[in-house]
Amino acid sequence: MARRLLVDDVLDSLRERIVAGEFPEHAPLPGEHELVSQYEVSRVTVREAIKVLHAQGLVRIERGRGTYVNPTRSWTSLPAVIQALSTQGDPAQISRDLLEMRGILECGAAQLAAERIGPEDLAALDAQVTAMEEASAAADVEAFVRADLAFHAVVLAASGNPFVPVLMEPLSAVLAAARAETSAVPQIQAHAIVEHRRVRAALASGDGAAAREAMAAHLRQTAEDLRRYVTHA
């Protein structure tokens, strides 16, 4: 157990240093002896931490030469990718990328949810839209974002596919931050309330194709609002 904790400590530290840019793309990591000295751990501990970084795509091991940092596009660790983009990426591009990802996942989830949603789910959607309206009237951006996120969480869960909400969960923090930026604009709040009501109506109809299109229309409106009121690009 103690060695496992040491491995995790070294792993977390190296991952943070890579994400922070201390070791940029294609740069070598310090050698094994140097890492052993830096972290005051055994070679086995260092090797296990490097193996995990390699398995997550953050580094590549070149036999006889050393360990080198991979480009971000090669990483398979979602937390590392999120952290890197959040600290080094272009906020406007991150928002656009998030909307594209949401379109891939949430439109399909809405289609499934229309076929499986129950009265309790619909009541929960109504409650969140009402909470959005009340938060907007009170100029409470934090409460507005909470209700917005909760609405979408209901849709994801109502898809009936347990993998769908699990896939979205690691992005919850970055999605909340993106929502806080856009939801600070009153016009965007007004548009969001209208679009959420349309999504709710489509879900209640039981028409999967209509629900998919309603969610897609909502995300298109969000993308347009982002361009018009936030990025001006």
Image (cartoon, rainbow, N blue to C red):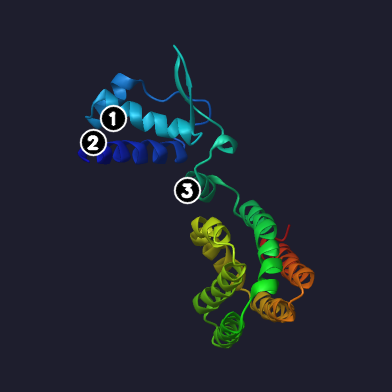
- Tell me which amino acid carries mark 1: Thr
Residue 208 left/right relative to 173: right
- Across and down, in percent, residue 95 comes to 63, 57
In which quadrant is the C terminus drawn?
bottom right
Identify the residue at image location x=67%, y=55%.
96
Could you tell me how many numbered marks the image carries?
3
Q: Nearer the viewer, residue 195 or 52?
A: 52
Give the residue number, with chain letter if any, for mark 1: 45
Q: Which mark is residue 79?
A: 3
- In the image, residue 43 sits, relative to residue 228, either above or below, namely above
The residue under label 2 is 3
Q: Residues within 10 Å of mark 2 (few under 14, many from 20)?
A: few
Looking at marks 2 and 1 on the same chain, the residue that comes earlier in the sequence is marked by 2
Residue neighbourhood size for the residue with mark 3, other residues' Cα within 10 Å, grouped as few (<14), some (14–19), many (≥20): few
Cα distance in 3D space between marks 3 and 1? 22 Å
Crowd around label 1: few <14 · some 14–19 · many ≥20 (10 Å): many
Tell whether label 1 touches label 2 (CB within 8 Å).
yes
Rendered residue at 22%/41% (across/down): 1
Q: Nearer the viewer, mark 3 or mark 1?
A: 1
Secondary element under disc 1, as helix, strand or loop, is: helix
Identity of the amino acid at label 3? Pro
